[in-house]
Image (cartoon, helix red, strand yellow):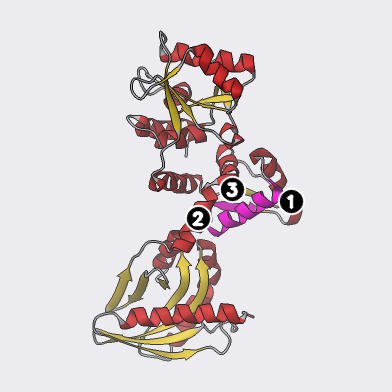
C-alpha cells in the first residue's frame, strides 16, 4: 500500500505525462481512468489514457513508478504484456503499455524499447510505439537518477566497484568484499543492491551464503569511463623537475627513497602503464601518488625536485585517501597502482594517454 506522499508523487508523474502528450502537434489526450489504489491490482495497470494523434486513436495503459532500472523492467514485463494483450482483445484501437516514472535509467529505456513497451519520465523522455503514431523523444537522464548513478563512482562505493573489477571473474560474499574494498559490510551491501538494479551483477545463494559476481564488467567500466570524462575534472597535481635523470631512473630513485622512509606510493598513468603493457618507445614523465606528510616532502627534497610550470618530469598527484592504493602491484621493485586505477588516471591525462588506456584495458584488464 502506498503512502499518501507516494500517491501524490505518482499522480504528479501521471499529470506530467498527460501534459506532455497534450503538447504534441495535432494531438488530443484524455485521462480516462485512474485506479482507486495505485498498483493494487495484480493485472490492471495504474491508469488509462486516451490519445488521438494524426487521425490515429491509441490507448495507453500506464504503470506508475518512482525510479526504473533494468531489473524493475524485467520484473514487470509480464504484467505489462498481459494487461496490453487482455485489453487489446476487446478493443479495435491500438493499445500500448507504458511505464511513467520520475526517472528511468538508460539501460531500462533500451530494454523497454526492445520489448516494444512505451515509457515517459519527468525529464521529458517519451516513447510510444504505436502503429501509425510512433513517438520517440529522448532527453538526458533526470538529475535525480544521474546523481544516484554518479554516487556509485565516488567515495567508499567506488572502492567496492574497484574490488569487483579487479576480481571480475570471481563470486564474492558481502563480508569478503567489504574486507577487500576496506569498507563496512553495510556499504558493500548497499552498493551491491544498487548494482543489481542496474543488472551489473549476478547473484547466487540466499541469506549469509549469498554471493555476487559482475555480470557485465565491460558495461560497468564503460559507465565509470563516462563518469570520468563527463566530470571534466583533471587530477590535482604538482609538477616537478628532477635534474640529471631519465624517467626509468627517476622512478627507481623515487621508489628507493619512499621505501627507505616508509612513505606509501604508487606509480600511475604512463609510467605504470608501460610496466603493465608497454605501448610507447619511451616516456618523459613519471606520475606518482604519494601519501601526504612531512616524509613525502623529505623524499622530494632528497630528489632535489623543484616546482615548475613547464618541462616537468615528475608529477605528484594529490592523494587524500588510501583508496587509490588499493590492489597495488609490485613489478621490478616498483609499486604500481592497480590496472583499474591506472586506467582511470590515464583517462584524465593528455597526449597519448587515452590510447594507452585503451591498450591497457585490452591487454591487461580484458574487459
Give the residue at mark 3: 157
Residue 35 percent location from the top left of the image: 53, 88
Q: Give the crowd class for mark 2: few <14, some 14-19, many >=20 residues within 10 Å.
A: some
Q: Examine the residues drawn in magenta and state their main secondary structure.
A: helix
Please name the residue shown 41% across and 47% down the image.
231
Give the residue at mark 1: 209
Which of the two discs, 1 and 2, labels the residue nearer the N terminus? Answer: 2
Residue extending furthest toward the top: 244
Which of the two discs, 1 and 3, labels the residue nearer the N terminus? Answer: 3
Inter-mark Cα distance, 3 to 2: 11 Å
Q: Quick one: quadrant of the N terminus? A: bottom right
Inter-mark Cα distance, 1 to 2: 27 Å
Residue 161 percent location from the top left of the image: 56, 45
Please name the residue shown 24% across and 87% down the image.
55
Inter-mark Cα distance, 1 to 3: 22 Å
Frontmost residue, 165 versus 91: 165
Which one is closest to the eye, mark 1 or mark 3? 3
User: Does the magenta segment cover residue 188?
Assistant: yes
Mark 2 secondary-structure assignment:
helix
Amino acid at each position: 500500500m502506498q503512502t499518501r506522499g507516494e500517491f501524490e508523487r505518482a499522480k504528479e508523474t501521471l499529470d506530467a505525462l498527460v501534459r506532455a502528450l497534450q503538447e504534441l502537434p495535432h494531438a488530443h489526450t484524455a485521462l480516462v481512468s485512474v485506479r482507486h489504489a495505485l498498483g493494487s491490482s495484480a493485472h490492471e495497470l495504474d491508469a488509462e489514457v486516451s490519445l488521438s494523434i494524426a487521425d490515429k486513436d491509441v490507448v495507453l495503459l500506464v504503470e506508475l513508478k518512482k525510479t526504473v532500472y533494468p531489473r524493475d523492467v524485467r520484473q514487470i514485463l509480464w504484467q505489462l504484456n498481459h494487461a496490453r494483450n487482455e485489453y487489446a482483445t476487446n478493443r479495435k484501437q491500438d493499445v500500448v503499455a507504458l511505464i511513467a516514472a520520475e526517472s528511468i535509467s538508460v539501460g531500462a529505456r533500451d530494454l523497454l524499447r526492445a520489448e516494444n513497451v512505451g515509457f515517459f519520465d519527468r525529464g521529458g523522455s517519451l516513447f510510444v510505439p504505436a502503429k501509425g503514431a510512433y513517438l520517440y523523444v529522448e532527453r538526458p537522464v533526470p538529475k535525480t537518477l544521474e546523481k544516484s548513478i554518479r554516487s556509485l563512482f565516488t567515495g567508499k562505493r567506488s572502492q567496492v566497484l574497484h574490488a569487483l573489477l579487479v576480481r571480475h571473474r570471481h563470486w564474492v560474499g558481502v563480508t569478503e568484499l567489504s574486507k577487500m574494498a576496506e569498507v563496512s559490510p553495510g556499504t558493500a551491501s548497499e552498493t551491491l543492491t544498487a548494482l543489481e538494479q542496474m543488472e551489473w551483477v549476478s547473484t547466487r545463494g540466499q541469506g549469509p551464503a549469498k554471493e555476487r559476481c559482475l555480470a557485465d564488467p565491460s558495461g560497468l567500466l564503460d559507465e565509470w569511463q563516462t563518469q570520468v570524462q563527463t566530470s571534466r575534472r583533471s587530477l590535482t597535481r604538482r609538477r616537478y623537475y628532477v635534474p640529471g635523470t631519465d624517467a626509468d631512473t627517476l622512478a627507481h630513485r623515487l621508489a628507493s627513497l619512499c621505501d627507505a622512509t616508509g612513505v606509501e606510493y604508487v606509480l600511475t598513468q604512463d609510467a605504470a602503464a608501460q610496466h603493465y603493457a608497454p605501448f610507447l618507445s619511451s616516456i618523459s614523465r613519471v606520475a606518482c601518488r604519494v601519501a601526504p606528510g612531512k616524509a613525502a616532502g623529505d623524499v622530494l627534497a632528497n630528489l632535489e625536485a623543484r616546482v615548475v610550470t613547464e618541462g616537468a618530469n615528475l608529477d605528484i598527484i594529490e592523494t587524500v585517501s588510501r583508496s587509490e592504493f588499493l590492489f597495488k602491484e609490485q613489478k621490478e621493485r616498483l609499486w604500481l597502482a592497480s590496472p583499474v586505477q591506472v586506467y582511470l588516471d590515464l583517462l584524465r591525462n593528455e597526449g597519448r594517454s587515452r590510447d594507452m588506456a585503451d591498450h591497457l584495458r585490452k591487454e591487461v584488464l580484458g574487459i
